Image (cartoon, helix red, strand yellow):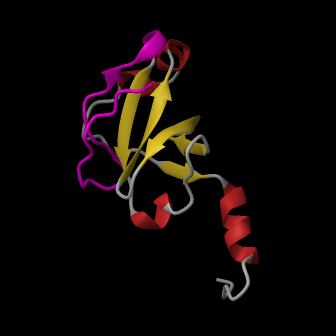
Amino acid sequence: MWRITSPSLRTNSLVDTPTLAVCGAIGLPISAPTELLRYLVYKGSITVDGVSLTVASLDDRSFTVSLIPETLERTNLGQAEPGVTVNLEVDVLAKYVERLMPGRIPS
């Protein structure tokens, strides 16, 4: 079970100090706009600053990813500071599903 820190209202940013969780993993909470959160699901994929990760938890304002020691060592996320803006990319499959929904006007 991951220990999640409380989110803030910053958009696309690290929102609090990472917390040590089970097996040396770090729970990293990130706030995001509603337009992006709609594409996230628990245990689904999210890319944070080019690193593909799994969503460990989410609510209506933020989500949390788990960073294992290997990820912390091999990526820039190990040095991420609270409040830093990060680039977020959602799984394209969710966008395809949304586009195929009946009544959806293509953009």
Of residues 3 and 18, the one nearer the viewer is 3
Residue 31 placement (x, y as % from top left): 34, 50
The C terminus, quarter of image: bottom right
In the rendered structure, the answer to whether residue 23 lies left or right of residue 102 reads left
In the rendered structure, the answer to whether residue 29 lies left or right of residue 102 reads left
Against 73, is 38 above or below?
below
In the rendered structure, the answer to whether residue 42 lies left or right of residue 9 reads right
Residue that protrudes farthest toward the front in the picture: 1
- Residue 3 in magenta stretch: yes
Rendered image quadrant of residue 106: bottom right
In the rendered structure, the answer to whether residue 48 lies left or right of residue 84 reads right
Residue 57 placement (x, y as % from top left): 46, 41
Q: Count the marks: how many? A: 0
- Residue 31 in magenta stretch: no
Residue 69 placement (x, y as % from top left): 49, 13
Against 85, is 54 above or below?
above
Residue at the spot x=40%, y=22% of the render?
26
Residue at the spot x=57%, y=60% of the render?
39
Residue 82 placement (x, y as % from top left): 25, 35
Of residues 63 and 83, the one nearer the viewer is 63
Q: Which residues are magenta?
A: 1-24
Rendered image quadrant of residue 74: top right
Of residues 20 and 33, the one nearer the viewer is 20
Magenta span: predominant SS is loop
The N terminus, quarter of image: top left
Residue at the spot x=36%, y=38% of the render?
29
Residue at the spot x=61%, y=44% of the render?
44
Rendered image quadrant of residue 96: bottom right
